[in-house]
Amino acid sequence: MPLNRFITIAWGKSGIDGKRSVAATGQFVTRAREWLRGHGHAMPWVWVQETGDVFGQHCHLLLHVDRSMKDLFGPMPLRWVKAILPERYVAKTLDTQTLPAARSAASNPLAYEAQLLGKLHYMMKTAPASLEEPLGMAGRGHKPWGQSCPVYGKRAAVWQNWKQWREGGALIA
């Protein structure tokens, strides 16, 4: 289940402040996860929360959407973001991208690894610079590590069923 979707949600653009944005990101992940679960699929995911001059409070998510769900999933992130927002949606609050190399992750793992690590490197730009080398991410992407920004609450989260997935256990209860 390769991470094959990269989503940025600029909560600050549409009226969600820093103190409520982590909860909004959690609501988004819950909606996506439950929607996919309802269609018989698990959704591995990871997200980070940031504040910046351009987007305000925002999050970046990497997640897996089963290939069979691609077309049905397509319009859903916008629907979920609009439902979570306290006011109306502002243009460019949501950006969603597919990771093309994920389609051939098994047959061309180096291409997928390069694309995935580039996205992870971008997501981890606020992590301590000392982590870049131990995580094998030196030279990935253009963002320097160790940037800082205020975040209220949790800065990052990861799918908790990864161990069960790696061991081949049941993914859907």
Image (tube, grey):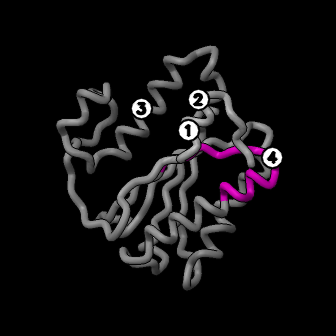
Please provide the residue range marked out in magenta.
32-46
Furthest toward the bottom, the residue is 87
Q: Amino acid at mark 2?
A: Arg
Q: Residues within 10 Å of mark 1 (few under 14, many from 20)?
A: some
Label 4 to label 1: alpha-carbon separation: 17 Å
> Which of the two discs, 2 and 3, labels the residue nearer the N terminus?
3
Label 2 to label 3: alpha-carbon separation: 19 Å
Residue carrying label 1: 162
From the viewer's side, name the closer residue of 14 and 46: 46
Residue carrying label 4: 40
Quick one: SS at disc 4?
Answer: loop
The x, y position of residue 83, in whole percent, is 65, 75
Q: Residues within 10 Å of mark 3 (few under 14, many from 20)?
A: some
Q: Amino acid at mark 3?
A: Leu
Residue carrying label 2: 166
Q: Residues within 10 Å of mark 2 (few under 14, many from 20)?
A: few
From the viewer's side, name the closer residue of 167 and 143: 167
> Which of the two discs, 3 and 4, labels the residue nearer the N terminus?
4
**Residue lying at 71% horizontally and 60% vertically, measured from the top left:** 76
Residue carrying label 3: 117
**Residue lying at 23% horizontally and 28% vertically, measured from the top left:** 133
